[in-house]
């Protein structure tokens, strides 16, 4: 039975549902022939595809270990097959199944899934954070040693015990100081050729002098600061700041004043190697007589009597020259070394109303944030103003990146801080329970 007979039988069986019109049989014959021709083209293309895929796979394994993408020949063959499949479009179920089989032979490629919104946001945050600058802690001049940091002029100094260091760019260099002095403060001024130091001259606690030595080139000039303590009293300086200009010398310091029994006896003309005060008696060791006991009441009224009764006393003071070898001493209200700055050639003192740096003196009430309780320090730079202030019982830092508590900058709770400038860098000294740390604003 040929195709025409099959069509006639089908039309006869379904004649009640189909309305015959002229040319209907020819139309059905044409559609059937087209379907058969497309089926042959499809299976011919699939056979070519399988052959090309086998050859291409063998070549890929042989020359590239099977790890590369499909060759250009494979891609061309696959493209041609896909075009033929697109032409074969029919409403019957058989056509749909054939199209599905063609799609199943299409190559699969490993693609990167599109980033989700959260991943895109996290990536943007990381990129922004990496582009921002941050505070970086700087190692001290002596690794592992406790360091006290001091700003002076356009530099930062580090003191480790009796040794002083200056930071040059990214390293520390020890300063050459007079061997005769127990240095308590250093002022670099405009360079080491004009080095200025303050310290104790002499090894005897009872007779040593507090002096300021100024180096001008290779010459040193010395200024003596008069001792204003009563006989028998000695001073132990725990910190000091020194500033020297063409017009004056100024030094702020915090010290502990106490009675030294040996110095007290020496002030009364009694020689002693060592001594101890217990109640109103002095137990001493005479170089010749040995152990000797003295009664304080025998010496009459003593100017140091209040320190004998109440013990050592801590105080802060400012001493500055007034010309012709005269000095003025002012007691300060707190027990912290008062910062000194040079503004227009005049030494300025930081106080409760002003914060001072070399070249600038700012009024605290004009720069303090409205919700802050206390302004600790502020510094004007070319990029804006940086400041440290107290709020909610925490110390906060405001810089070009906004505000944040200082405990996010340092890995230890911060008790106090001081901003400074070293050449073009903005730096910060923070004080923690473990000591001081120096931070630099940089990449």
Image (spheres, rainbow, N blue to C red):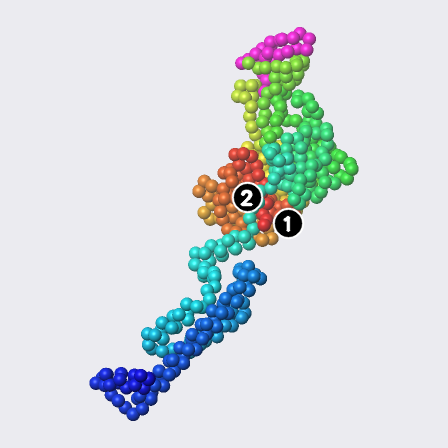
Tell me the quarter of the picture where residue 146 sits: top right
The disc placed on residue 424 is 1
Q: Quick one: which residue is furthest to the left in this view?
A: 16
Foreground residue, 130 or 7? 7
Q: CA distance from mark 2 to mark 1?
A: 19 Å
Percent from the top left, x then y, of residue 398? 52, 48
Does the segment drawn in magenta span residue 289? yes
| Above or below 140: residue 315 | above
Residue at the spot 61% in from the left edge and 29% down from the top edge? 237
Label 1 packing within 10 angstroms: few (<14), some (14-19), many (20+): few
Residue projecting furthest to the bottom: 22
Marks 2 and 1, the one that precedes in the sequence: 2
Q: What x and y, as percent, mark residue 421?
A: 62, 46
Q: Are marks 2 and 1 in contact (CB under 8 Å)?
A: no
Specify whether 107 is left or right of 348: left
Quarter of the image for residue 18 reads: bottom left
Helix or strand or loop: what does disc 1 sit on? loop
User: How crowded is the residue under tag 2: few (<14 C-alpha within 10 Å), some, or many (20+)?
Assistant: many
**Residue shown at 46% from the left, 48% from the top:** 370
Q: Which residues are magenta?
A: 279-304
């Amino acid at each position: 039975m040929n195709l025409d007979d099959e069509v006639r039988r089908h039309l006869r069986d379904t004649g009640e549902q189909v309305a015959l019109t002229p040319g209907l049989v020819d139309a059905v014959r044409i559609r059937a022939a087209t379907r058969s021709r497309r089926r042959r083209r499809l299976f011919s293309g699939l056979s070519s595809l399988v052959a090309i895929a086998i050859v291409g796979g063998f070549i890929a394994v042989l020359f590239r270990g099977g790890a590369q993408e499909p060759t250009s020949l494979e891609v061309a063959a696959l493209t041609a097959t896909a075009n033929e499949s697109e032409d074969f479009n029919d409403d019957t179920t058989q056509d749909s199944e054939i199209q599905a089989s063609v799609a199943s032979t299409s190559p699969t490629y490993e693609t990167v899934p599109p980033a989700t919104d959260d991943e895109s946001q996290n990536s943007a945050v990381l990129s922004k954070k990496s582009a921002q600058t941050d505070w970086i802690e700087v190692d001290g001049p002596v690794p592992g040693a406790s360091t006290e940091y001091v700003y002076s002029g356009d530099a930062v100094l580090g003191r480790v015990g009796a040794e002083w260091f200056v930071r040059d760019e990214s390293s520390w260099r020890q300063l050459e100081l007079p061997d005769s002095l127990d240095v308590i403060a250093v002022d670099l001024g405009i360079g080491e050729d004009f080095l200025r130091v303050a310290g104790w001259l002499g090894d005897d606690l009872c007779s040593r002098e507090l002096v300021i030595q100024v180096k001008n080139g290779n010459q040193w000039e010395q200024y003596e600061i008069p001792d204003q303590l009563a006989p028998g009293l000695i001073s132990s300086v725990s910190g000091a700041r020194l500033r020297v200009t063409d017009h004056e010398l100024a030094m702020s310091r915090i010290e502990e004043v106490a009675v030294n029994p040996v110095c007290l006896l020496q002030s009364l003309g009694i020689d002693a190697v060592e001594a101890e005060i217990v109640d109103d008696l002095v137990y001493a060791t005479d170089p010749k007589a040995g152990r000797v006991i003295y009664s304080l009441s025998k010496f009459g009224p003593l100017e140091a009597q209040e320190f004998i009764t109440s013990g050592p006393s801590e105080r802060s003071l400012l001493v500055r020259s007034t010309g012709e070898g005269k000095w003025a001493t002012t007691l300060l209200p707190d027990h912290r070394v008062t910062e000194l700055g040079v503004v227009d050639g005049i030494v300025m003192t930081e106080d409760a109303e002003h914060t001072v740096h070399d070249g600038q003196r700012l009024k605290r009430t004009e720069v303090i944030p409205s919700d802050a309780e206390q302004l600790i320090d502020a510094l004007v730079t070319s990029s804006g103003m940086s400041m440290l202030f107290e709020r909610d019982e925490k110390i906060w830092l405001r810089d070009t990146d906004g505000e944040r508590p200082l405990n996010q900058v340092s890995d230890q709770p911060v008790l106090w801080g001081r901003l400074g400038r070293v050449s073009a860098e903005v730096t910060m000294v923070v004080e923690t329970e473990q000591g001081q740390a120096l931070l630099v604003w940089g990449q």
